[in-house]
Image (spheres, grey):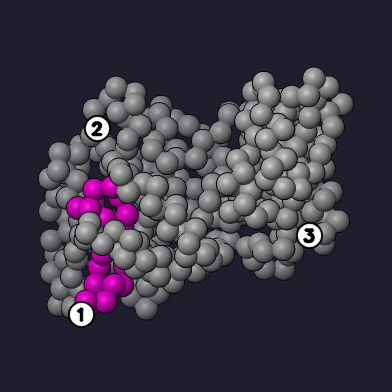
Amino acid sequence: MAELKLIASPEELDSLKGPGDIPPLTAEELRVHRPDAHWVMIDNDGRLAGRCSLWWTVVPDLPGERLGVIGHYAARDAGSAGQLLAHACRELAGHGCTVAVGPMDGNSWRRYRFVTERGPEPPFFLEPDNPDDYPQHFDTAGFAPLARYYSYLVSSLEGTVTAAAGLEARLRADGITLRALRPDNFTGELERIYDLSLAGFRDNFLYTPIGRAEFLAMYAKVQPHALPELILFAEQEGSPVGFIFSLPDMLRLQRGSPLDTVILKSLAVLPAWSGRGIGTLLMLKAMETAREMGFRRAILALIHEQNRSRTMSGHYGEEMRLYTLYARRVR
């Protein structure tokens, strides 16, 4: 049987860099994500057979429950997965949790959910991915779906060209105008996106805030691939009330395919302006701009099953991917 070991410091991860199918967690992830515990499984040959992090101190809110979170998950096989997940659930129960949720790297700003229905489309840029047997690991360990998320493919941008005109005119009468990101002040623009995100996402399922520094570091990593024309702000008298962050699907280039697809990654509108069509306008204008730039398709990425933007996405695109977040009672 594999040995379970608690990692007490990032430096201990260096000892895990031996041969094996599972890479260890990086020291940066351990430092930045600050789990309450990180466990690894070492087999009889000294190879890494599994790993996961646990959070129980700073976690999302689930009404009526004390949530524990399982993330940074990897397992070499079903046997290792069963041992690791059983241990994780016991640990969370021992720290007062009633429900375990996963996979989630601490909160929903980071990597979370499993791909559970792939469809024919290949992975897209920045999309979370996982081996196909990982959902079965959670199923076998007694977890059940807690929430589902979808990505949609708009296979042709031609039909979106004129759809925004009437909506844009109506919102302009309310003082709402759109503008693209100013590339000469990328960090300042990210600051605006951060503020809008905290307010616009606060009612999202399992929402928790994220620190400004971590947020800026996450988005700064994609700056080399960002096209300012595809990152739009909605403003009222110069004050931002919403944004959409879109970028090209760079994985298509790696596969030798044409760079003809844009990903609509994040969309948020301040609660006070919700329901007025600003989110729809931002989505339509981003797709219209992408078409004018020569893009042929769009992916509307990672939308919660109860999010109102799923209705918009279903109107213009078709479901291309299903993702699932799991939960299990632990006490």
Q: Is residue 242 magenta?
A: yes
Q: Position of residue 194 (x, y in %)?
A: 40, 65
Q: Which residues are the magenta region?
A: 226-247
The answer to whether the residues at label 1 and label 3 have Cβ atoms under 8 Å apart is no
Q: Name the residue nearer the viewer: 57 or 155.
A: 57
* Residue located beneath label 3 in the image: 97
Q: Residues within 10 Å of mark 2 (few under 14, many from 20)?
A: some
Q: Nearer the N terminus, badge 2 or badge 3?
A: 3
* Dot 2: element: loop
Between the C-alphas of marks 2 and 1, the distance is 36 Å
**Residue type at the position of mark 1:** Glu
Does residue 16 sit above or below 72 in this rendering?
above
Q: Nearer the viewer, residue 191 or 162?
A: 191
Q: Is residue 145 magenta?
A: no
Residue 1: % across, % down:
87, 26
At 39% across and 30% down in the image, what residue appears?
Answer: 121
